[in-house]
Amino acid sequence: MSAHKHAQTHYPVVDVIKHRWSPRAFTPQPLSDDDLRTLFEAAAWAPSAMNEQPWRFIYAHREQTEAFQRIWNCLLPGNQPWAKHAAVLVVVLARKTMGANDAPNRHYLHDTGMATANLLLQAASMGIHGHVMGGFDMAKTQEALHLPADLEPATFLALGYVGEAEQLEEPFRSRELAPRSRKPLSEFVFENELPA
């Protein structure tokens, strides 16, 4: 059974936010280059400090076996079993310095996260899903992709179309079928100041 886990929100939000979730089961269907370019175009229009746009993306289609394998090898063992079925793997990079003067950009990770969110929401609007992964080997990623010192791997993305939960081994199958949840607003939204 394919799981489509729409968020049960307490307040009305746009459908694309409710429908975005992070599957681990993907179909064999590839992503077209045009669709992938649309996702990166959406990322390009995220806000950033001083319009610096510190994000960079390196990607490989599953059919690009050698390049896909190089990215996949950088994932930790907890992500490798299911991520190998994604249509596309993406390495999200963040430039730590400003382009004009190489001064530190304090907002580089925040702004790169904004671009990633844009990409994921655009994907959800197109019936494509992405799973963000923080479980990767930083040193191996830097070496495998020959990254310069000012580019930091921020996260990895698995992109594709939602597959059947039953294709996953445990513990991934149970996680795929588990209901979604979020903290209540009272735990992270405060008027005027933090509680004492």
Image (cartoon, rainbow, N blue to C red):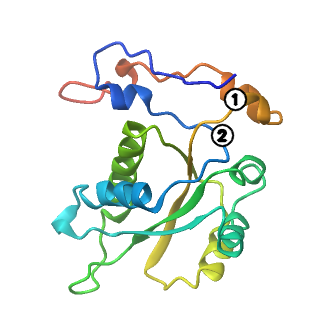
Q: Position of residue 186 (x, y in %)?
A: 35, 18
Q: Which mark is residue 91?
A: none
Q: Quadrant of residue 156?
A: bottom right
Q: Which mark is residue 24?
A: 2
Which quadrant is the N terminus positioned in? Answer: top right
Q: Secondary structure at mark 2?
A: loop
Please give the name of the residue rendered at 55% of the width and 22% of the height, measured from the top-left corner: 180
- 147 or 70, which lies in front? 70
Please give the name of the residue rendered at 23% of the width and 60% of the height, measured from the top-left corner: 48
Q: Are marks 2 and 1 in contact (CB under 8 Å)?
A: yes
Please give the name of the residue rendered at 69% of the width and 60% of the height, measured from the top-left corner: 75
Q: Is residue 49 left or right of residue 35?
A: left
Q: Position of residue 171 (x, y in %)?
A: 80, 33
Q: Is residue 110 visible?
A: no
Q: Quadrant of residue 141?
A: bottom right
Q: How many residues crowd around disc 1 within 10 Å: few (fewer than 14), some, or many (20 or more)?
A: some
Q: Is residue 184 left or right of residue 135?
A: left
Q: Is residue 143 left or right of residue 150?
A: right
Q: How many residues crowd around disc 2 within 10 Å: few (fewer than 14), some, or many (20 or more)?
A: many
- Distance (Cα) linking label 2 and label 1: 9 Å
Asked if 116 appears above or below 106 in the picture, the reply is above
- The amino acid marked with disc number 2 is Arg
Which quadrant is the C terminus positioned in? Answer: top left
Please give the name of the residue rendered at 58% of the width and 85% of the height, measured from the top-left corner: 146
- 17 or 129, which lies in front? 129
Which residue in the protein does label 1 denote?
175
Q: Is residue 132 visible?
A: yes
- 148 or 41, which lies in front? 41
Sequence order check: which comes first, mark 2 or mark 1? Answer: 2
Q: Position of residue 19 (x, y in %)?
A: 43, 28
